[in-house]
Structure formats: structure tokens, C-alpha cells
Image (cartoon, rainbow, N blue to C red):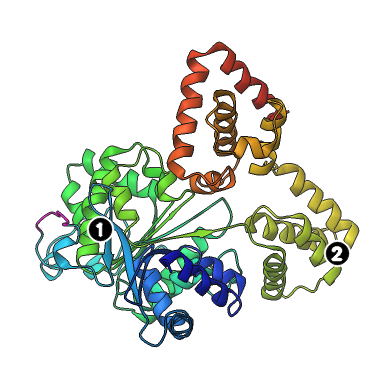
Amino acid sequence: MTALTVWNNCLSFVKDNIQLQAYKTWFEPIIPIKLQDNILSVQVPSKFFYEWLEEHYVKLLKVVLTKELGKDAKLVYIIKMENNYGNDISFTEKIPSEYKPKIKSQDLDSSSNFLKTNLTNPFIIPGIKNLKIDSQLNLNYNFESFLEGDSNRLARSAGYAVSKRPGGTSFNPLLIFGGVGLGKTHLANAIGINVKQAFPEKTVLYISAEKFTQQYVDSVKKNNRNDFIHFYQLIDVLIIDDVQFFSGKSGTQDVFFHIFNHLHQNGKQVVLTSDKAPVDMQEIEQRLLSRFKWGLSAELQTPDYETRISIIKNKLSRDGVLMDEEIIYYVAKHIKTNIRELEGAIISLMAQSSFNKKQITLDLAKVIVEKFVKNTKKEISIDQIQKVVSDYFQMDVSTLQSKTRKRHIVQARQLAMFFSKKFTKASLASIGTKIGHRDHATVLHACKTVDNLAFTDKQFRKYVEDLDKKFTD
């Protein structure tokens, strides 16, 4: 028997005993490494992943391993981490301290000494004494109003765990990423609100990456950069929204690097949101990206139909509005892009009913929904892009996805990857998986190749222009 054979047998049993979504989330990413003396070694993506398996599925794993390897069976986890240079290193179970990334940070006095000094507040908010600052949290964005579904379960669960043990879990930093209007800001605020309720003595701060950057620029102009750094190093839970805004801003990245190191070293919690996964972020320094990957990156996806119905019902309940289920189902079925638009459509319906004294009917819902759908640019799927590119080059999609290295097929495949990155919100890893099970590095290389060839090769540039018209017309 091989490790792969044993693990595949285990997966068959596991799949029959847990929900499909749980199986995809917690078991599909596991990679069997080796089998020796009834000890199966498997690789998991992070320490958080390992802890979750041990907490929720240890009994199931014991049963299935005993079934496959006998009563002496053992399971060893290999936790994949990154060193400071971006190279993967594997550690078994607990990470030996001598291998932990060494973090350089400014030598600073203790927090208690800082509280005795005249600390400059970059927010210009009254009440800075003893760091009793305004956390900048939106109290409407709480966990009660953030409905759980398959599209957000991992991110919500991780966020809730962080709020109960800030700085005390393996997911530090917690990076929440996803498209516009899927609830990143909502979830980030909910974490902060829960922390404030459970730990009123902790200093929590929510801030956009744009505002953070502006404060940093102002501190440089006023020659008080050190005060700016000291201020942020005193925060217990730092929440930065839209961290992709740091792209290309080397000064901001450098100062955040030092702040992050200090917070992480001292057991403080960092929560970040982004519209991209770390692997897809452009013009962010590698040393910073590697730190983003230390904890957990959790994706928020487009909510499914059932979750959209729950969101609408929750919104109506909070506002004390009654609406026929037929109308609720219609709105949920036709507005799929994001939660913000879904709630916007409901608010528009309520406004029409209230201001124009109209009854909320299915016909009225159709009019409102049509306006929202028209104003929303339809996203092309990766499957559609592959079909258009394949038809253009007169080949089957299966040929485009194949492993052949024939030049015209490779170029077609690269163009499919290029347009998938351009016209969808999918991550590079997702694009690679869809187009012949390639990795994110292959997709990144394909996009760069298309850019280069379009600049140097007249015929190839025509391919790009022709296909671009097909997707935009």
C-alpha cells in the first residue's frame, strides 16, 4: 500500500459520513506524503487547519485509519509554512522555535512607558488619554446580522474564533478576501465589536488602508513618523480594510511591516480585508505578502440562492416589513452578484412602497430588479471564456485544457487564462484549476506572456484585439 492509496480509501469513508461542503473545505486540501510502519503522514495548509481537524474530526480520523491500517495506526500532520524568503518549509505538528521566522522590529519601550508620554494621535480624535480612542466600528455590522452560508462559513467561523481569543489563535493575521459587496467590511467590524464586548480593556481600531496611508504621509510631512508608529504599536486588535490599497506604496508598506512585526510578536491580533488573495496581489513586497500568509486567508464567495433568501428575510425582519414569499424568491433568484445589491433592491422596494404609497407586488419587484440587473455589468465565467477562445482557434475546450505543448494550443490556453484574469474576479489559483488543473504560477506566467507577445507580435496582437471585442461587445 502507498500513502495515496490509503488516504484515498480514507476519503471515500469520510465523504460518506460528513456534509459535502465540510469535506471540500477540510479534507480535499490534505495531501498524503508518506506511509511508514502504519504511520500515515499528511500535509495540511496551516496550523489553524490542523487544529480544526483535531478539534472537529479526530474521532472520525481515528475510526477510518484503524479501519485501513489496524489498531496501531497513527496520523502525523505536516504543517506547511513559509520562511522569510517565500520558500515553503514543512514542519510536523509543533513548529520548532529555532525554525520560526525571525522578526526584526524597532526597539521600543514597554506600553506602560508610552502611556506616560505625550502621544501624538494621528486621528485627531478627542480622548486620546490612556488610549481610550474611538474604535471607528460600525455597530450595525455585527455577527447577528452577518448570516452564515456555504459561501462564507469558513471566514465567519474564523472571524468569530478570533473575536473570542484575539491574538490567541493560529489565524493571526486573519485575511478576509473576496469581491465587492460580499461582506468583508461587515465581518471585519463584527470581529471588532465582539472583541470590545468581551474584552472592554482592549484597544480595538478599524481603519481603511487608504486612511492609514494618508496618516502616514501626513506624519512624514510633520516629521512625527515615530509617533505614528508608536501609536499603532499600542493597538490590541488592528483591523485594516482594503489592504490591497498598499500596492505600489513602498513607504506605507515599510511602516506597516514594522507595525505588523511588533503586534504579532506581542500577541496582538491583526485582521485584514482585501479584494484579492495574497497570491494575486500586485506590487506588494514579498516580505509583507509572506506575513499575510502566516495565519489564515479566508475567502468570501457569492452567496448561494438559499443564503440570499435568508439575507432578504433578515433585512425585512429587522425593518419590520412584511413581503410575500413569491416576491422574496424572485428577488433572490435574479440578483446574484453581491449582498449590497440584494439589500439595495429591498430598500428600493420599501422606498417605492412608502413614498409612493404603492403596494409591494411582484410587478413592482420586477421593475426594481430589472433596473439593478441592467446597472450591473454581467461577469463572464471562465467556462464561457474557454469556449469563446476555443471556437476562435477552431479547437475543442478539452484540447485547450490538454497538456500538449503545440504552440498554437499553448497560445490559446494562455489567452484563455489572460482573459479569465481580466474579466472575472476569480483568483489565479481558481483560473488555473479551471483551465486544465494548472497552478497559479502558470496563470501568472501566461498573463505576462500575453502582454509581451501583444506588444512584440503583430499577429498575436490581432488575436487579443479580436477576442477582446467578443467579450466586450
Q: Is residue 220 above or below residue 40?
A: above
Residue range (magenta): 102-107
Q: Amino acid at mark 2?
A: Ile
Q: Is residue 154 above or below residue 277?
A: below
Q: Which of the 4 quarters of the picture holds residue 344?
A: bottom right
Circle number at residue 275? none
Left or right placement of residue 335 versus residue 193 in this view: right
Q: Give yes or no for residue 464 being in the magenta stretch.
A: no
Per the image, the residue denoted by label 2 is 360
Q: Residue furthest top?
A: 458
Q: Which of the 4 quarters of the picture holds residue 193?
A: bottom left
Q: Is residue 81 above or below residue 200?
A: above
Per the image, the residue denoted by label 1 is 232
Dot 2 or dot 1, earlier in sequence: 1
Badge 1: few (under 14), some or many (20 or more) residues near its Cα, within 10 Å? some
Q: Secondary structure at mark 1?
A: helix
Q: Magenta stretch mostly in which secondary structure?
A: loop
Q: Position of residue 183 (x, y in %)?
A: 55, 60
